[in-house]
Image: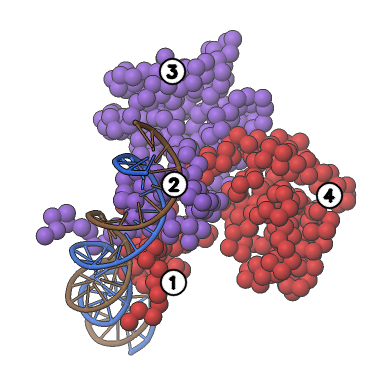
Chain colours: A red, B purple, C brown, D blue
Amino acid sequence: MTAAEQDRNISSSFAKGLAVLAVFDAQTPSMTLAEIARRSGQDRATARRGALTLVQAGYLRQDGRMLSLTPRVLALAGGFLQANQFGRRVQPPLNRHARQMEIEVTLAMLDQGRVLLLAQSTVDHGHITYGFTAGSHIPLAHTSLGRMLLAGLPADEAAAVLAEADIPRHTGQSLTDPEAILERVAQAREQGYCLTDSEFEGGITGYAVPVSRPGRTPIVAGCSAPRGSQPEADAERLLRGLQLCAAELRQAEAVDHL
Amino acid sequence: MTAAEQDRNISSSFAKGLAVLAVFDAQTPSMTLAEIARRSGQDRATARRGALTLVQAGYLRQDGRMLSLTPRVLALAGGFLQANQFGRRVQPPLNRHARQMEIEVTLAMLDQGRVLLLAQSTVDHGHITYGFTAGSHIPLAHTSLGRMLLAGLPADEAAAVLAEADIPRHTGQSLTDPEAILERVAQAREQGYCLTDSEFEGGITGYAVPVSRPGRTPIVAGCSAPRGSQPEADAERLLRGLQLCAAELRQAEAVDHL
DNA sequence: GCATCAATGTTCGCTTTGCGAACGCTGTCA
DNA sequence: TGACAGCGTTCGCAAAGCGAACATTGATGC
């Protein structure tokens, strides 16, 4: 009696193992077996087999009872980055505009109810940096990147995605009502850019503009900076820079088939 | 009769699935099932199950009969990068020195007989760029990064690693005799830096210095540039810059536990 | 110091999964 | 048009791996 109609085309052991690997995208640098089991929602024995397999394959390292990712996982991402020519087609425009704007520029897309950072220009100056890198996840609801991404979806889909995402309160200014957030999203959709202020980190303003063509899976570019003495002049300058950057990426078709 | 003494702690299905995922680190952006099967050395049916599982998990996308990586694989690397604070501790020094040197600086380590790029500064100027990114693999034998990495190993281990790696001929200047290469490696080990000229790409000189402390798993920093009119002055300037960068990374203990 | 308890890591019998030979389908060449 | 080569897909049977049960570790009370 098999009530659960298991699909013979899917390897459940493999899927469970992948869940073990994916658990490490949290901020926790290393975990015990039991913790992996808990976070991946699997039996300890199952998680153990998955983890030991990953150790043998070289993706995980075991120090005593702690397990942590090895640099080899970078090679997995490397495949994607090379296939899509990020080094040639995405990173250079990002860097050039970042340098002109004198600010870090980030490219992002939706992933599982969060914002996935695809690439980040790296400009050197005195500014604070969150320390996010390509592959980092950041919250959806309280960042300009997240809201601009939602704005790239039809309103009903955006509402559905937001309903699935959790909406923690980062600062006193964070909007917590989904309706209020969706209103900001609609506003971003209309005006073609998104600003947020102090909702994720106090005193920091976020800027974002769309990169992907309408209808495609949304991709956005954005940046963030401490609120200065002339907020409106800053906003105008930065949004103009982001728009230029986005236009260039669009023209280079750097991002069309993600 | 089970002659092969299969380890009950390892999930072979998972290992095979991982092999499917790893196949995409080639330069091939998308593949058919049969090609995946061939490259991963697996039965077509097995490869199919692995691939379909990856599709369901969102790491692979299926367009007709072609399969390609999705951006979600970046999240796997993101876990590693965040855990090791690359955004805070590695990227900023790299960028700063790259800007001072006016050249792209790369951080790398050994991985499976090749050089794995861990991070890359991103400076904007007119120079040629190979288009490599973090996570890219480059050859071991004919790059200064590769030879400096080998120099970080005891001589016998270096020879063993090199024996496993393949040594294609990229240019007319590529050394092909393992002994000759090991001699250059020994030279690099003694003098504490490595230069290569035109062995990977004609007219391009590569520079590399060690970053990790002696005895640890080798990590190196390097850069490459077209040979200019004053090769020796260039070499001195660039090596000095790389040494400063390496010293800073060492002091920040940015790379100690990889 | 010893007993108690909770939480983690590991084993092994039973069931389920997934291996791969075999099949059908599609496009190509003579 | 028939033969063929390469591809994706199916299904019976062997073996892989699930998880209850068992060790092991380490913290807490007496």
Q: Chain of mark 4?
A: A
* Residue pictured at 73% horizontal, 63% vertical: A154
Discs 4 and 2 carry the same chain letter = no
Q: Quadrant of residue D23?
A: bottom left
Q: Is residue B38 left or right of residue B207?
A: left
Which residue is more in the foreground, B202 or B146?
Answer: B202
Which residue occupies 67% across, 47% down? A106
Tag of residue A235: 4
Mark with earlier residue (1, 4): 1
For label 4, the crowd category at 10 Å Cα-Cα, with few meaning under 14, some 14 to 19 and many 20 or more, is: some
Viewer-nearest of discs 2 and 3: 2
Q: Nearer the viewer, residue B252 or A101?
A: A101
How many other residues sit within 10 Å of disc 1, few (<14), some (14-19) or many (≥20)? some
Q: Give the amino acid type for the residue marked by disc 4 in the picture.
A: Ala
Left or right of B52, for residue A242:
right
Disc 3: host chain: B
Query: In this rendering, does residue B231 appear at all?
Result: yes
- The chain ID associated with circle 2 is B
Gap between marks 3 and 4 measured at Cα:
50 Å
SS class, disc 2:
loop
Above or below, A221 relative to B214? below
Q: Give the residue at mark 2.
A: B32
Q: Which residue is mark 3?
A: B171
- Same subunit, labels 3 and 1: the answer reads no
At label 2, the amino acid type is Thr
Badge 3: few (under 14), some or many (20 or more) residues near its Cα, within 10 Å? some
Judging by the rendered image, the residue that carries numbered circle 1 is A41
Side (left or right) of A143 relative to B104: right
Q: Secondary structure at mark 4?
A: helix
- Asked if the residue at tag 1 contacts the one at tag 3, i.e. Cβ–Cβ closer than 8 Å, the answer is no
